[in-house]
Image (cartoon, coloured by chain):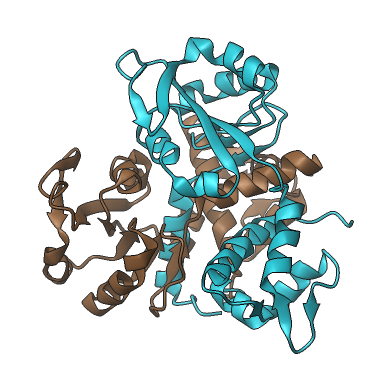
Chain colours: A cyan, B brown
């Protein structure tokens, strides 16, 4: 398969959310135009994105919601349950630990860590008690963690990332506003980006493409 | 100015975060290559993105960090403080109400609303008490809110969006996993997208471009 650009992969994840919504409503077929309007992009972009994965649609009929959804899950690697730990039991860590849509999408939070004595051993979400970060290495070795979330201050994020990489974690979702030097894949989440993009849309009234 | 595509606008917001980090470190000039490595994209993409806004760099020298930062802030409409309300005082609402980087980036949370009697009147963040959603319309009229955040269940998100639009709110950041029918600009935030994109990177080891 041709190498798929990152923006396409990101959109695949969004298509998947839209397809799940359609499936829940019992809708079986969707056109590129409908998907485009849900993502606020052009329908030619949808057709181009999906053409990377072979001939998934039927001209004039649209895409089979279930088949397209399965194909995207396969491409994204969602055929297995991913084991996730969260570092940082603050507000962001707590919101993620309680975010039901993560497990529904095959990302299971198996542990939360913090260094703050006041937080350790407290329940942060159903079935999840905050662990001492000193247990991190051993936990990762014993449980084979796939993904770690960094919901910690920027000042400690990079040291933790290096430690996680050494311990064998395969990828990081980083909420700290910094750039990590580790070599495993990292996704940076900066919530302010959504607000800034929206501000631009409002100022330029360029929302409807 | 030529119409700027949405993915470029989104990257501008990310460039801005990187530039702020550089400014904090006292770095005055940055090359397209450095910016590219921070964003994990090609440097040709950085040069193309920034060329929309005139000749901002100097060949062989790179971009002036301060000037580029100011230009991007101007393009994104960050020359003013945006007034933001949050609907939903759950875990996501609480994390946002306490997210210092929003105000640092000119998005000021002025109120949080909920319909749950147990949450109303409780302090959710420094200086912010949860208000009854029944006061929403009047609050928006009196205070001229720019942006509303929907951190509510999908089942009530669209009705609230319509109400907000009528009240004169200019744009919405939507955390609910649904598609809104209102006509004001909406930015959808789906945290699972970051996890799915990361899963793909891990599976395909296609991280380093």
Looking at the image, residue B207 lies above or below residue A168: below
Looking at the image, residue A149 lies above or below residue B187: above
Question: Quick check: B184 left or right of B81?
Answer: right
Residue B157, by quadrant, is: bottom left
Residue B164, by quadrant, is: bottom left
Name the residue at the front extreme: A26
Taking depth in this image into account, of A27 and B193 the one nearest to the observer is A27
Taking depth in this image into account, of B69 and A26 the one nearest to the observer is A26
Question: Quick check: B192 left or right of B141?
Answer: right
Question: Quick check: B76 left or right of A16?
Answer: left
Q: Is residue B40 visible?
A: no
Residue at screen point 70% across, 21% down: A168
Looking at the image, residue B15 lies above or below residue A156: below
Place of residue B31 in the rendered image (x, y in percent of width and height, measured from the top left): 68, 42
Taking depth in this image into account, of B53 and A208 the one nearest to the observer is A208
Residue at screen point 40% across, 40% down: A98
Residue at screen point 16% across, 47% down: B119
Name the residue at the right extreme: A1
Could you tell me which quadrant the N terminus of chain B lies in? bottom right
Could you tell me which quadrant the C terminus of chain B lies in? top right
Residue B40, by quadrant, is: top right
- The count of marks equals 0
Q: Is residue B116 visible?
A: yes
Place of residue A112 in the rendered image (x, y in percent of width and height, measured from the top left): 46, 26
Place of residue A33 in the rendered image (x, y in percent of width and height, measured from the top left): 64, 82
Question: Quick check: A143 left or right of B60?
Answer: left
Place of residue A207 in the rendered image (x, y in percent of width and height, measured from the top left): 48, 75
Looking at the image, residue B187 lies above or below residue B89: below
């Amino acid at each position: 398969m041709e190498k798929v650009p990152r923006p396409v992969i990101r959109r695949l994840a969004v298509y998947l959310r839209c397809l799940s919504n359609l499936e829940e409503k019992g809708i079986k077929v969707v056109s590129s135009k409908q998907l485009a309007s849900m993502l606020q992009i052009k329908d030619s972009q949808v057709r181009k994105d999906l053409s990377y994965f072979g001939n998934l649609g039927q001209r004039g009929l649209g895409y089979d919601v279930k088949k397209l959804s399965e194909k995207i899950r396969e491409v994204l690697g969602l055929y297995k349950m991913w084991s996730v730990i969260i570092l940082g039991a603050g507000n962001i860590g707590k919101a993620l630990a309680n975010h039901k849509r993560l497990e529904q999408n095959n990302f299971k939070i198996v542990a939360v860590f913090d260094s703050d004595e006041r937080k350790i051993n407290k329940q942060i979400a159903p079935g999840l008690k905050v662990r001492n970060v000193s247990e991190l290495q051993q936990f990762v070795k014993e449980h084979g963690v796939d993904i770690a979330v960094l919901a910690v201050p920027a000042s400690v994020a990079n040291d933790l990332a290096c430690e996680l990489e050494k311990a064998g974690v395969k990828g990081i979702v980083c909420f700290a506003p910094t750039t990590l030097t580790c070599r495993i894949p990292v996704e940076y989440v900066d919530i302010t980006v959504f607000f800034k993009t929206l501000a631009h849309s409002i100022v330029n009234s360029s929302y409807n493409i």
